[in-house]
Image (cartoon, rainbow, N blue to C red):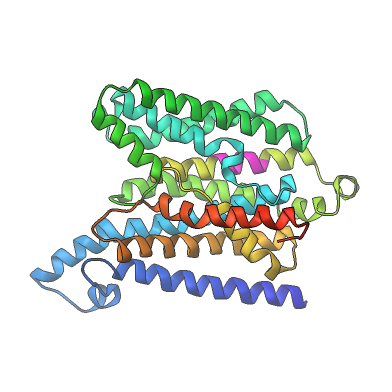
Amino acid sequence: MGARRRLLGLSLGLAVLTALLFYLSLALGQVWIDPLSLWLFETGPSTAADHIILTEIRTPRAILSVFIGGILGLSGAVLQGLLRNPLAEPGLLGVSASASLGAVIAIYSGLTTLFAYALPFSALGGALISVMLLRLLAGRSTNILVLILTGIAITSLAGALTSLTLNLSSNPFAALEIVFWMMGSLTDRSFVHVSLSVPLIILGAILLFSTARALDALSLGQDVAHSLGIHLRRTQIMAVLGTAIGVGAATAVSGAIGFVGLIVPHLLRPLVGNKPGHLLPVSALGGAVFLLTADIAVRILFPANDLKLGVVTALIGAPFFLWLLFTFHRGDKP
């Protein structure tokens, strides 16, 4: 009962913090806009411009921050529980790298000039192809090591092909666009991006949440999980598909944003008693808090430099990753 009460309190606290940061994400920028006052009370010519800024620019950005941060945090928690590897994160399966490759090919081939939303569709296609490759190469094996090595191979292949595309690009503007997109950003996103990605992110989240009971059982060992009726291969399929659909859809509209799925579960795991199933909902909320905070920081601290969101998460995540390695090297549990 105490663990459930602690989980409920933590979830409620993170939900309130997410709502507060969502409000700040709508309000903060080069121009302060109070969303509640604007929607409820104010009218007039000056307010029309504020309405456009709020509804067309800031609201899609804030919504995407919540859902993308949520799916990255959730998928990281699921993969760490499934692979029983505290260093696992969504990029381990090659989904992010393959989605980036799909977007890069769309830019390089000129599809983005013919069809405005060719980039997110191509990125999503790249993510789905990576899943088919993963299932094809890993086969019916339930060996965790095989799954990890297959994901690393796909990541390496997608990274090499992305580098090759950049190397072959004769158009400096296309190459610059590719580099900027790969850094990850939520700038200039619209409700079209929201409608394209959010339904798929929700679908991916449903698949990932369905693994909660199996992850709790797997934390006791595979033999115990089998005795409790857990089907390991089905759990793997749900986790891989959920990650591919959710993270693929997120990467399709935001570019590559790394380390969220690594950092958030680690920070929250001690607060939920190291129970994988309890970690899932708080990791989703924690991911939303993390990305909203990072996106607000980008806009407030570097308003004129257009610092990319993926750069900020990498600057935070890389030292955190090194700290984890140092902790493991000492033989301690983080």
Residue 329 lies left or right of residue 188; in this view the side is: right
The residue depicted at 53 percent of the width and 59 percent of the height is 287
Q: Is residue 42 above or below residue 51?
A: below
Relative to the observer, which residue lies in front, 37 or 222?
222
Q: Percent position (x, y) of residue 48? A: 14, 66
Residue 211 lies left or right of residue 55; in this view the side is: right
Considering the whole magenta stretch, tell me its main secondary structure.
helix
Q: Quadrant of the N terminus?
A: bottom right
Q: Percent position (x, y) of residue 100? A: 44, 35
The residue depicted at 50 percent of the width and 40 percent of the height is 248
Q: Is residue 65 above or below residue 230?
A: below
Q: What is the span of residues highlighted in magenta in the rendered image?
A: 238-244
Relative to the observer, which residue lies in front, 49 or 151?
151
Q: Percent position (x, y) of residue 282? A: 61, 64
Q: Quadrant of the C terminus?
A: bottom right
Question: Is residue 165 on the magenta stretch?
Answer: no
Q: Percent position (x, y) of residue 176? A: 29, 35
Residue 232 lies left or right of residue 281; in this view the side is: right
